[in-house]
Amino acid sequence: MRAGRRVPALGRMAQADTVVPGGVQGWDRYAYLNNNPVRFADPTGHREACGAYTQDCGDDQAPPRPDDDEGAVDREGNGGGDSGPDLPSDWWIPTEFGWRDQLEGCVKVPIPVGACGTLGLNIVYNRSSGEIIGYVDWSYPVGVGAGGGGSLTTGPLLGCFASDTDNIISSPSYNLGGTLANEAAASISVTSPLVADKTYGAVPLLFYGGGGGGGFYGGGGVGQSGTLVAASVSVNDLFTP
């Protein structure tokens, strides 16, 4: 029989424990399970013992916790079960590398709100899928700025969280960017389909930063973008006899 009677409302024993458990909590002989009922069990009524799924709580060892597909958490606090896709170990390394030539025209006069249109020629390598894709895209950002004119810039593309090139040809995509052109020109932008990648579980981002010439306007905006034409090839196919 159990040696003590517990009062659930108080979380304490009705009689003092006949055995003084170890640790600081053990000096309170009316305490139940060292004040830690989640970790310990009390099969004898004399002292605490390992709970059903506790591995490291004294000399008594219990069987390991079964797999829990509903999102178990281990003793180190790491999530388990079906908590989403496992991120690749190299998730922090960019997944896409490329180059872009961009032609842009903007009208932001006589008021400081207007629209721009861009046309881009791109080539991108995706290291995750081993694909090389060439494509022509457009964007129509609306925003604030001053002046009006056109520019031609060229520069690198850098992408992240993309397991293949589907993020590039996804429609619709969205573009946020800006250009400053006064004979010399500089342009930056980021494009995304705003849909999480199936492997990385994050929204793919493709960054562009380029320089060139043009004038005379400046500003930034956000708008929709899309692909006019695209063609891709696997790197393995290029080197396979």
Image (tube, rainbow, N blue to C red):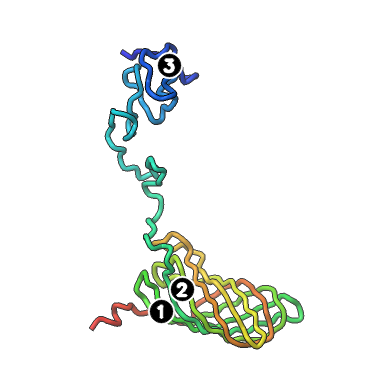
Q: Nearer the viewer, residue 8 or 158?
A: 158
Of tags 3 and 1, which is closer to the observer?
3
Q: Nearer the viewer, residue 99 or 195?
A: 99
- The disc, 3 or 1, on the residue closer to the chain's N-terminal end is 3
Q: Quadrant for the C terminus, please.
A: bottom left
| Residue 14 appears left or right of 211 | left
Distance Cα–Cα, label 2 vs label 1: 9 Å
Q: Are marks 2 and 1 in contact (CB under 8 Å)?
A: yes
Badge 2 marks a residue whose secondary structure is helix
Q: Nearer the viewer, residue 213 or 198?
A: 213
Q: Amino acid at mark 1?
A: Ile
x and y percentages locating residue 37 in the rendered image: 41, 27
Residue wearing tag 3: 29
- The disc, 3 or 2, on the residue closer to the chain's N-terminal end is 3
Residue wearing tag 2: 168
Q: Residue at x 69, y 85 (%)?
A: 216
Q: Please, is residue 216 above or below residue 24 in the view?
A: below
Q: Please, is residue 238 above or below residue 88 in the view?
A: below
Residue wearing tag 1: 133
